[in-house]
Structure formats: structure tokens, C-alpha cells
Image (cartoon, coloured by chain):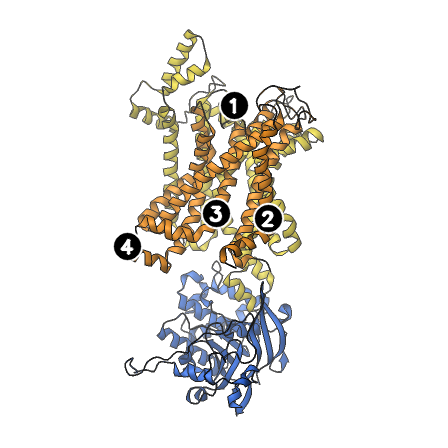
Chain colours: A blue, B orange, C yellow
Amino acid sequence: MALRVENLRIYYRTLRGYVHAVEGATFSVGDGEIMGLAGESGCGKTTLGHSLIYLKPPMAYIEGHVFLDGRELPIWDMDRMNEFRFRHISIIPQYAMNALNPTRRIGPLIADLLATRGIDFRQILPELQRRLDLVQLSPEVLNRYPFELSGGMRQRVVMVISTLLNPSLLIADEITSALDVSTQRAVCEMIVEFRNRGFVRSTIFITHDMSILYQIADTILVMYAGQLAEKAPVEAIFRSPRHPYTRMLIASLPRVGARQRVERLKGIPGSPPPLLDPPPGCRFRDRCPLAFERCQEPPPFVEVEPGHFVACWREI
Amino acid sequence: MGSRSELLYFAWRNTKVRVGVLILALFVILAIVGPLFARHDPNAYVGPPAHPPSREYWLGTTTFGQDVYSQFVHGLRATFIVGLLGGGIGTLLGVCIGLLAGYRGGMVDEILNMFTNIVLILPTLAVLIIIAAYLTVRGILVESLFIGCTAWPWAARAIRAQTFSLRAREFVDLARMSGRSSWKIMFYEIAPNMLSYLFMTFILQFGGAVLIAATLDFIGLGPTQGISLGLMMNNAVLWAALPLGMWWWLIPPGAAITAIVGALYVMNVGLDEVFNPKLREL
Amino acid sequence: MIRYLGRKLFVYLLTFFFAVTIDWLIPRLMPGNPVDIMVSRMALRADAAEVVRSYYIQAFQLDLPLWRQYLNFWIALFRGDLGVSIWLFPQPVISVIARAVPYDLLLLLPAILLSWVLGNQVGAMAARVRWLDNTVLPLAYILTATPYMWLALLLAWSLGQVAGLFPISGAYGYNIRPHLSWVFIRDLLWHWTLPFLSLFLVMFGGWAIGMRNMIIYELEADYSRYLSALGAPQRLIRRYAFRNAVLPQITGLALQLGAIVAGAVATEIAFAYPGTGYLILQAVLNQDYFLLQGCFLFIITGVLVANLIIDIVYILVDPRTRLGMVGE
């Protein structure tokens, strides 16, 4: 297994106490798998993604283990993690359009970065040019300043840089959120291309947009209020979701061709619980139509079918 | 906890704010109460010349035998008045121009910007030299007016930037759609949302006014009557306080200004932390 | 880039025009006849007053129509004729000022440059070393809150008067005349130390604080976070942060020129250092309006030229202005 996460607990340290952002996450991502990490805003998916590569205060590591290709990642140790960053685990951040130093040309910027990793820029240049070509950018881009490029071009540059050293795990954090649909499609296709050509082995694709995941993900991990709700192959999530939250999520997706008069949009009434002092047990129980007394105890995340994990007392 | 009292709670808990406010309060009290203890008129020749501090004259006497303590506390009053007036005028002008430029944008902004830049570049001192030299009688009000009318560009720039970011918000669109006049929108919708910013701007203007006034007075371009801390230092230098080693005349006025302005700056940094939760240290 | 420079030049020319006009206008706006005011202040005997009055009328050209006065003022300006000093009659104002300028430059250039460079370095260091931040920062705040003349007086009193290490007035000893020799240069530098130090220290505080804040801001920027997430060492990130933080410090220098001028004037007065500041004090005390006007114009020109130089430097350093993206 490429990535294995065991019982990861990440809280945010604030003046008023700990915010329980990620509570006991256990899952794995296989070689060549594109796993979508989905959930509503504030469910902890970005925290989870970032904690794997850059765990900076106010994020606090509480407990848990992360294994990449069999080796444990010391995610709590900022210095020791440097060995893994960029080479084995990499990230395309949400702020990709602003992620480049505005006063440095892109070529020299990449050269500086590679030099700190002991890699000669000139040696990797041919490969770099090939990849730029793949994302439809002219190699001329290397001589430009970031502000001379459009936002979309900057994002593609960042995508190329992040995957340049062929990492085992790529974390793509909401990279489609600020784009129009046709650009979204192009970006998603690039992610799949990266995987198909072996530039990237496993990918965690963080988004709140389920429809995109339907197109490109192999599996989907649904989070709710810091807890893992369900993980399954993409077809299973859409055709036969087992967690009540996932079911309501799928049901609330608009369908192409559906008209308001015939079918009304269904939402999920209520809102997620505060994570500063979260209620014990399953955090969805206040909004769950199937909740019963057992839900006071946190349900374990178990495999109910091959490859299909759920955390719900009703399904065990 | 309501947001108002929560703000005050954080403000008081912040060391910088606490220290700044306490030092400032000390000097304010001194300025208000001190003159009551002054037995002599600040400019009257009452004692033995060039006397070090003694029981009779708490801060000693000047080369002419004037009571330094009396000059000090009266000068403190003058300093605060100029700071308040000059800082107030500067803030008011800066806020009006900044709000107008930021809200209107376009041509209005361009013109106001150019005007702001011109006043910004012009070295204040040079202009004030020319004006003050021809004005035979100058009072505190005139000095405060000068300072306010030349220090406002800093405030205008800051307020303009804030206005730009606020004007894109929904509540402004709402106000505009409901037909409110521009001025009403600027003062009743936008300004209240940057109260913290306005307050900090005023603090900086206050501190700046105190410094500029001290420098002007020192050069001899301050008020022609009365006494101020800068004027004390001017007199001290002109009347040989240095070679005579009259530290009690030289040191206290400048020390007071440094303490007051320093307290204001530190308070400002602290308030920035209070109003910007991101800067708060955990 | 040309557009950017062109706009700046336009503003400077406008400012110069504005300043000169104010200079010309003020005496004529004052209630009453400026000549009468000046003569009455001099409290002379009637016949002496008459001579002085007629001289002033001719000097101010008050007998000519207004527009001619204005035009002549500009013409004289371009010919370098700033009138004749009253205090140091009959020396022309321009030569009085010319004698003072070298002392200004001697004081200001090293003080500004050194305080800017060192202030930026120390500020940058304070941004990453905790204990340095806790010691340097409060000190810097105190320094920047200190009025220039008070620090000058403090240094003069402590190091000059009490410790007797440095002289407290003048640019060189009373028993020496300016000439090129080691003795003179040593004496010059000895007298120069305290004024330089007081200017340097106050400015240093301001730059250190500004740079520290800018570095912290840059270290939290998106590009810094991205590089850190990709495992770049702090060295690289700090290098980028420093280069980006220096840019606003350059424009900051241009903005501070007005305050620096005021500080220099105050310092020169405190030390009786024979620069333009000292001239201003004497001009005020002796009611020498021509000298005052001359100093004013000199200061304005100096500040505008300095602004222009700084703008050019900024263009060379910030690629965004060079390629026409950002203009201020």
C-alpha cells in the first residue's frame, strides 16, 4: 500500500482550547489510486491533507501514524519531514495562483528550489520542458515573471513544479474550486495524465465538488465534522452509499435535466456541530434521521464489503 | 461575552496596550494636576539662576531663574493640546479625503491621489518655515492647524486602502440600492466598520503631531507666547544649558516627549494585535 | 516604465511649481505690506527706515505689476539669483547656501545610507531570532519615538559635556581654518561624530521596525508557504523574503525625506553645525527673509531630486514596474 494512515488525530490550538479538526482517521490509498477526499466546508479535509505534508502551528499533532511506501512519516517533526517533501510527497495548494515569488522569473525559481535538493537544473531541464508541453505551456514560460502569466497558467506551472520529482503521493487541495467548468475539466484531465504516465503514484484529490470526483476518482473518502464517514470505490459511493450522510449528500446533488417543478433540490437540514467541544459519539447524529441510542458511542470505521468502509452503527 | 466587551478584555490583556495606556495616563495626570502644584508662573523670573533641582524648585531653575518644574508641567499641557488638536485635524482631513478617494474611485481618486502625493512629498518643515516666518503672532491653534493640514496624507492613504476593501462588500451595495447619498454611505456605513482602524490612525497622528510640534518649537517657529516642551529645549540650547551642564533643563522635556510618543506607538502595535486576531500570540 | 517615470516626473514638477508659487505668494498674502512689517520689526530711526524700505521695495519688486513680479521671480530662480542675504550682507544668498551644502551632505548621506542598510539588516535578523526581536524591537521603538534634537542634546550632554569625549558645537575647532590636511580632517570627523550619531540612531530605529514587519509579512505570504511545503530550507525562503521586503523600504525612504529634513535641521541647530539647518535658525532669528526663501527652495529641490533618484532605483530593482504592471 502506498499510503497508510492509522488513527490520526490533528487538533487546532486556539486561545479557547483545542478544535478537534481530525478525529481518529484510519484509511489507505493504494498505488496508482486517485482518492477523492470530499465533504462540506470545515469538515477537516484540508486539515487532513495538509497535516500529511506541512503540519504547522496552530495545527497540533496529537497522535497517530502515517506510513508512505512502508516508511513512517515523521509529520510532527518539521525538519525531518524535509527529506520527504517534494521528493516523495508533494502538494498543489489551494492558493496555487499566488504560490510563486512575484519578483523572480520562473526558471530561476525552479533552479533555486532544485539546487536546495541537490539537483542540477540543466539536467532536469529537458524533462521540465516535456512536462510544460504536456500541460500546454510554452517553455518560454521559464523566462517570465509570474505576473506576466494568467492565473490559469500560473496554476499549471505550479502543477508541473509540484510533480517534477515524481512523488509517491500528491495532495491536490481544492485546485478546481476557483475555475470555470472548461478549465476544471482540463485540470482534472492533467491530474489523471500525471497518474497514467507515472509522474505521480497516488493522489488525494480534496474537493467539495462530488461531480468532479465522479469523473476522475477511483475511490472517494467522505468526511463529516472531523470524522471519516465512508470510503468506497466511486461507483459504490454513488450507486449504493451506506452512510446516512453520504446518502443525503448524493441525494442533494442536482441531476442534469432535472427541473425544479418536477423535482425539488433536497438539502440536509441543520448544520455541523462545533468542533471546539464536540459532542461525544457520532457527530452526525443530530442531523441523522436514523440516529438511535448506540450513536452516543463513536462508531468504528470498518470494512463492510471489500474496499467499502463505513462508520455507522446501522451498517455494522 | 459581547464583542465590545470581548474587545476591551483582549485590549487590556495585551501587555503593550496596558503599558502604553498606563504611561500615557501618567503624563495626562501630570499635565492636568501638575500645574496646580506649580507655585510660580512658568516664564516669571523667580529664583536664583541656573540652580539644580532642590526642595524649593523641584526641577531647578533656568539661566534666568525661571522655575523649570512650572515650565515643564505647563509645557506638558501645551504638548497634549497640540497633539489632540493637530492630530484631530489631521485625522479628520485624512479620513474625509481617504474615504472620498476610496469610495468614489476613478477620476476623483486620481486627482485626490495626486494632491495627496504633492502634500506628502513637500517637506513639511520647509513650508512651515516660510509661513511661520511671516506670521508675527502665532498661537497654539495656528500651530495645530499647520500640523493638521500637513500631516493628513499618511492618514488619507491608510483610510483609502481600507475603504477600497470595504466598498466591495455587500452592505455597501445594499445601501447604494436603497438610495442613500454617497456622503451618508461613507460616514454611516463604511466608517463605522473601520472604527478600530480610525482609532489607530488617530493615535499615530497624535504621536506625529507631538513630535512635529516639538521640532517646530525647537527651531523657534512655534507659538510666540506661552511655553512648550520644545520651546524649553530651544531656550536651553540658546542660553548655554549645555556648557553649563544644566541637565535638569535639557533632559526632562525631551524625555517626556519620547515617553509619550513611545507609549503611543507601542499602544498602536498592541491595538493592532487586538483588532487583528491573526497577529495575537498564543 | 516610461509611463511610470513620466507620471512621477509630472508630479514632481507640479510640486516644484506649487512650492515656488507658495514661496512667492506668502509674503504677498500676509495682511499689510510685507515691507512695512519687516521694517517695523527692525525698529529703526525714521531716516534709516526709509532707506531700508526703499531697498526692500526694490528687492521684492513691489512696484511692478503682480504678474511681472511672478515672472521675474521665476527668471531669477533659473539664473540662480536668490537675492542678497540680510544677515550676512552683502553676500548673495546662493553663495551662503553653497558654503553650507557640503556640511549637509557630509552629515546626511552617511547617516541616511548607513541607517537604512544597517536598519534593514538588523530588522531582518530580528524577524527570525526571538531573543534579538525581544531586545532590538523595544529599543527601536524608543529610538524612533525620540525627537531628533533631544537625542542630539542627550548625546551632547553625556558624551560631550560630561564625558568630554566629543565637542558639542561647530564643524571644526575655532582655532583651525578649513584646509586639506590630516589635522583638519581629524578635527572635522571629531566634530562630525555626535551629530551623525544622533541622526543615525533615530533613523535606524525606524528602518529596523519597518523591515522586521515587512519580513514577517513576506514570510507568511503564499509563496513562502508553498516553498516550505516543498521542503525548501529556511535560507532560501529568507533570501526571497528579504529581497521582496526591501522594495517597500525603498519607497519608504522617499516618503521619509520630509521628516529626515526636519530632523537634520533640528540636529544641526542643536550642535551649531554649519549646514542649511543652522542657516535657517539664523535666518529666523535675524529676519533674513531672502536667506529663508533660499533655504526653502534649496530644500525643496533637494528633496525632489532625491525622490527622483529613488524612483529610478526602484524601477531598476522591481521587475513589476519595469514591465509596466504595477505603478504607484
Do the residues indicated by labels 3 and 1 lie within the same chain of the protein? no
In whole angstroms, how far apart are the C-alphas of marks 1 and 2? 44 Å
Host chain of mark 3: B
Where, by quadrant of the figure, is residue B274 drawn? bottom right
Residue B127 percent coordinates (x, y): 43, 32
Label annotation for residue B199: 3
**Which chain is disc 2 placed on?**
B
User: On screen, C127 above or below A42?
Assistant: above
Residue type indicated by callout 3: Phe
- The circle on residue C212 is none
Q: Residues within 10 Å of mark 2 (few under 14, many from 20)?
A: some
Depth order, front residue of C141/C237: C141
Visible in this render: residue B160? yes
Q: Secondary structure at mark 3?
A: helix
Q: Residue at x 64, y 32 (%)?
A: B251
User: Identity of the amino acid at label 4?
Assistant: Gly
Residue B184 position, x and y percent, is 33, 49
Mark 4: few/some/many CA within 10 Å (<14, 14-19, 20+): few
Residue under label 1:
C282
- Which residue is situated farthest in the bottom direction here? A305
For the residue carrying disc 3, how many other residues have a C-alpha within 10 Å: few (<14), some (14-19), or many (20+)? some
Q: Is residue A314 above or below residue B247?
A: below
Residue closest to the eye, A21 or C19? A21
Element assignment for label 1: helix
Q: Are marks 3 and 4 on the same chain?
A: yes
Residue type at mark 1 is: Gln
- Residue at image coords 44%, 20%: C84
Q: Residue furthest right?
A: C163
* Quadrant in the picture for residue A29: bottom right
